Amino acid sequence: MRGLRANASRCSHAELDEAEELDDGDPVELAGQYSTLRRRYPWINVLGGCCGTDHRHIAQIAVACQG
């Protein structure tokens, strides 16, 4: 199993450590980036999210990366 779990937030780790709130990022943009990575590295078969990622991001990732 090979996985990928990116932050929805565009903040650096230092900025995330200092933040009182997470920025939401852009679910469509994140899904597009995942889709590009899946085309380049098709063996990635587990996709998820980390800081700032919620159900909106996961739904967009699922649509963008469905086989």
Image (spheres, rainbow, N blue to C red):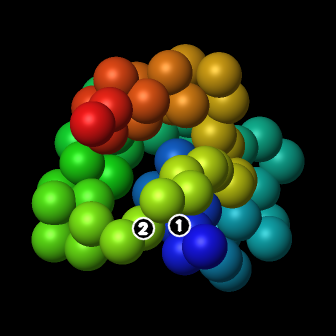
User: Viewer-proximal residue, 9 or 19?
Assistant: 9
Q: Quadrant of the C terminus?
A: top left
Give the Cα separation between the discs numbered 1 and 2: 7 Å
The answer to whether residue 25 is visible is yes
The answer to whether residue 27 is visible is no
Q: Quadrant of the N terminus?
A: bottom right
- Residue 5 sits in which quadrant? bottom right
For numbered disc 1, what is the local secondary structure?
strand
Residue at image location 16% in from the left, 60% down from the top: 39
Residue holding disc 2: 44
What amino acid type should be assigned to the residue bearing mark 2?
A: Ile
Residue 61, x across and y down, in percent: 41, 35
Q: Are marks 1 and 2 in contact (CB under 8 Å)?
A: yes
For discs 1 and 2, the disc positioned in front in the rendered view: 2
For numbered disc 2, what is the local secondary structure?
loop
Residue at image location 43% in from the left, 30% down from the top: 62
Residue at image location 66% in from the left, 43% down from the top: 52
Residue 58, x across and y down, in percent: 55, 31
User: Viewer-proximal residue, 31 or 7?
Assistant: 31
User: Viewer-proximal residue, 28 or 37?
Assistant: 37
Residue 35 sits above or below residue 38 on the image: above
Label 1: few (<14), some (14–19) or many (≥20) C-alpha neighbours in 10 Å: some
Residue holding disc 1: 4
Total marks shown come to 2
- Residue 53 sits in which quadrant? top right
What amino acid type should be assigned to the residue bearing mark 1?
A: Leu
Residue 41 sits above or below residue 32 on the image: below
Residue 42 sits above or below residue 34 on the image: below
Q: Which is more N-terminal, label 2 or label 1?
A: 1
Residue 20 sits above or below residue 44 on the image: above
Residue 40, x across and y down, in percent: 16, 71
Label 2: few (<14), some (14–19) or many (≥20) C-alpha neighbours in 10 Å: some
